[in-house]
Image (cartoon, rainbow, N blue to C red):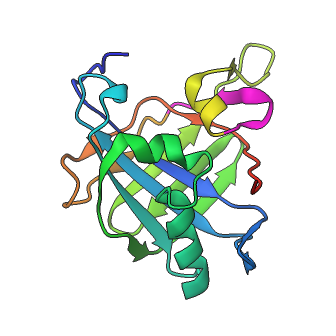
Amino acid sequence: MVMDQGWCASPWLIRISEGSSDGVDLSGCNVVLAMFFPGPTLLDGDGTGRLYLDYRNGSEQRRELEEIFMARKGGPMDVVGNLLSTWLSPQVTRIDVSDSNGSIEASVGEFGRIISNRLVNEEGDKVTMRNAGFSLVWRFADNTAELAPSEGSTWQDPDMPVAWRGSSGAVGQIHWEEG
């Protein structure tokens, strides 16, 4: 896959509805993983990543979230972690999320805004994509992602290689277990 701008960047909003890691309850935690890939293809790797952790998460929760989403605990994040050669220091910031009528919006401190609007067809059914690489790696439920363009999303972390605006996007439910 050749990138349309010569590079690719994306913030991923991860909302944990329930779960724990090493005895630490992570239910209700929000995390954002922003990634930049210089191209010419995504699989060339050499990406830059940074985690943004909600300031309302406790210190033990933040520690576990860093371990998981910076690919230090294995699992589905190993694939993403192998594509990121540079990890910037995680940032603790305010992450506010709203979800209504098929739209998800998140503000992430001074760093950015994520907007995802689920697509529906003429009958009002969600438009989905099955068995795409990311939905398999991240273990989306039924290997299915709902298409959710991110027009209006912006990201401007001064430590990331570029600032960007969103266009494509997807939403999915994931279920991870240890072992």
- Relative side of 26 to 12, left or right: right
In the rendered view, tell whether residue 112 sits above or below residue 143: below
Is 110 placed left or right of 69 in the picture?
Answer: left
Using the image as rendered, state which of residue 90 and residue 17 is in the foreground: 90
Quarter occupied by residue 8: top left
Residue 77 location in percent, x, y?
54, 48
Q: Which residues are magenta?
A: 139-149
Whether residue 169 is visible, yes or no, is: yes
Q: Position of residue 57 (x, y in %)?
A: 59, 80
| Residue found farthest to the top | 122
The residue lying furthest to the bottom in this view is 59
Please state which of residues 39 and 100 is positioned toward the viewer in this rendering: 39
Q: Is residue 7 magenta?
A: no
For image coordinates 59% across by 61% down, the residue present is 97
Q: What's the residue at 30%, 28% (across, down)?
A: 44
Q: Is residue 149 left or right of residue 86?
A: right
